[in-house]
Image (cartoon, rainbow, N blue to C red):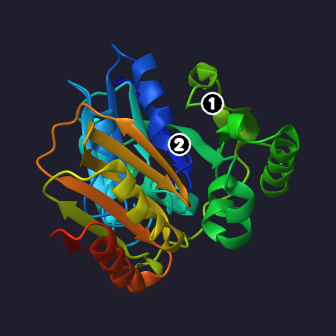
Amino acid sequence: MKEKTNLYLLTGFLGAGKTTLLTNILNDLSGQRVGVIMNEFGKIGIDGNIIRKDGMGLVEINRGSIFCSCLKISFVQAMVEMVDHELKYLFVESSGLADPSNIGEIMKAVKELKGDAYEYKGAICLVDAVHFLEQINDLETVERQLKHCHLAVISKVDLVDENTLNTIKSKIREINGIVEIQTAILGKLNYDFINEDLMKNQWAETEDSTNTPENKPKALSLTFQGKVKKEDLTRFIDKVSENAYRIKGFFQLEDGWNQVDVVNRRIDYKLSDTSETESQLVFISKIGPAIIKNIFDAWNEVIGQEMKLRN
């Protein structure tokens, strides 16, 4: 009898650290047959370049949530195709704006098309310790991700005090009273979950996802040929970041290629060995199309060179 593929879903709001966690997991599982389905809202996939490894099966599904009707069929088809790779593990990293409430419906569709090929091992939800308490008051998506997860991992705990951490844990417990809670710094945690039955923490039944074509956030991609100073790029981002849930990409600065990662007003730069042909940033807007003028005005004021902005 053919061995089932162990399926894990990674959820968590934009910037919580899903890709960092996934990178560490993949390193820990080196030598195993592992596949990844990566979902991003922007037209340009950024995170696939970060986790890509030789011999690893990788499918990128961009421009929306895999739990929305607009991409649900693409997600099911990707999982069906992955079956033929005879993987030991398949990790699905969903967009930070994804509501996974209908994962049961999707698993049922895959089973009807390809048989009982997957063993769903559970959803791991990343919780951003720095921004969670603000996000949970404003965004139903964050609550849905926790409601339907089987392991909650609080990331960036080194950046908050103990009282804040305890408040976060209490809030998680209000939403999901039985989920196991772990903490992580730089995406490092106890990987024993691989050998545990996370599904014992299942309590919420499948329901309709709140992701719909009508409430899909505006995503834009900026591309640029040339180099800029880090301080100039920082000034530009500072003028835009309050209107964006997330900004990320790769940019050529004076010290070389940098991975740029922005959550709220926090900007992180990390030197990268990427060899892109052009710099690119992806913006997920808080204010819909109005961010377009904001980006153009800030870019022209600070950088003043030709760039391209696309949907």
- Residue at 24% over, 44% down: 81
Is residue 4 left or right of 149 when viewed as pictured? Answer: left
Q: Quadrant of the C terminus?
A: bottom left
Residue displayed at 16% across by 37% down: 275
Q: Quarter-wise, where is residue 33 in the image? A: top left
Taking the image as shown, residue 301 lies to the left or right of residue 151, namely left
> At which x and y percent is residue 298?
36, 74
Identify whether 264 is placed above or below 187.
below
**Residue at the spot 61% in from the left edge and 46% down from the top edge:** 125
Q: Amino acid at mark 1?
A: Ile
Q: Which residue is mark 1?
A: 185
Disc 1 on helix, strand or loop? Answer: loop
Q: Which mark is residue 3?
A: none
Residue position marked by numbered label 2 in the rendering = 17
Q: Secondary structure at mark 2?
A: loop
Q: Amino acid at mark 2?
A: Gly
Say if residue 33 shows up in the picture: yes
Q: Position of residue 160 (x, y in %)?
A: 75, 42
Residue 310: image x %, image y %?
A: 22, 73
Is residue 210 placed above or below 268 in the rendered structure?
Answer: below
Disc 2/disc 1 C-alpha distance (Å)? 10 Å
